[in-house]
Amino acid sequence: MTLLFGVYGASGCGRGILPLVRDEVGGQDVRLVFIDDAPASEWQNGQEVWTFERFAAEPAVRRVAVLAIANSRVRERLDRRCREAEIEIAGTTAANVVVMDDVEIAPGALLSPFVTLTSNIRIGRCFHANLYSYVEHDCVIGDYVTFAPGVHCNGNVTIGDHAYVGAGALIRQGLTIGAGAIVGMGAVVTKNVPAGATVVGNPAHPMDKRSSC
């Protein structure tokens, strides 16, 4: 029996992550597939696409899943589903990611190319850091947090569970981004963001829901 690796999600996020996993596990006795709950086809980008049920039942010495799902709430649900099925959760790290001193990363983190994590950082479960994002010194990041490409997270920032930070956003040092908050694309955050709030603009301000309709 072989080691079975599955990238959960065959959409855009998963297609960007599977090559990183392949680079990390290549050359070993590993079978690598996509996992998808509603597969559109049996193959995607040269890899087989399996249902979760097939992945959980396939004979293997060990089953490992990488959760390449952008929606953090779905990511949490699938994390729980996999662990209940005794499927190990793993992350992946691009070869050119920079990780400096005293960085603690919980299982399931996906670190895309050109990500930088400097020093004395604590990162929670199933963190996603997309292309060219950075996290500076002494930051604390919760579980299931998502950074879109090009996020600039400066030092001493605390980010709550399930927060989402949009592409190109910049967070000033020393701030707190509350649990479930959304920071819009290109926002420049100069003040704390309450839990569940959505902020946009430069400087970032609460989104007027009336104008978003």
Image (cartoon, rainbow, N blue to C red):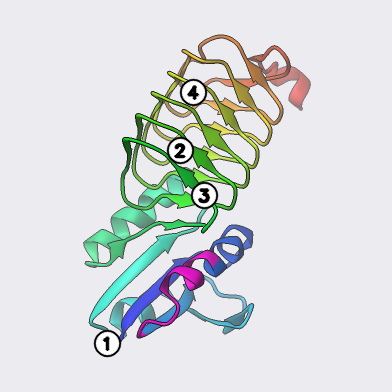
Q: Which residue is mark 2?
A: 145
Residues at marks 1 and 3 touching, judged by CB atoms closer than 8 Å: no
Name the quarter where the N terminus is drawn: bottom left
SS category of the residue bearing label 4: loop
SS category of the residue bearing label 3: loop
Residues at marks 4 and 3 touching, judged by CB atoms closer than 8 Å: no
Label 2 crowd bin: few (<14), some (14–19), many (20+), radius 10 Å: many
Residue type at the position of mark 1: Pro
Compared with 124, 3 (above or below) is below
CA gap between label 4 and label 1 equals 42 Å
Drawn side of residue 166 relative to residue 96, left or right:
right
- Nearer the N terminus, badge 4 or badge 3? 3
SS category of the residue bearing label 1: loop
Give the residue at x 41% y 39%.
Answer: 100
- Nearer the N terminus, badge 1 or badge 2? 1
Residue type at the position of mark 4: Gly
CA gap between label 1 and label 3 equals 33 Å
Q: Which residue is mark 3?
A: 97
Drawn side of residue 198 relative to residue 99, left or right:
right
Majority secondary structure in the magenta region: helix
- In the picture, the disc for residue 59 is 1
Camera-near label (2 vs 4) is: 2
Seen from the viewer's position, the closer of residues 166 and 23 is: 23
- Nearer the N terminus, badge 2 or badge 3? 3
Q: Which residue is mark 4?
A: 196
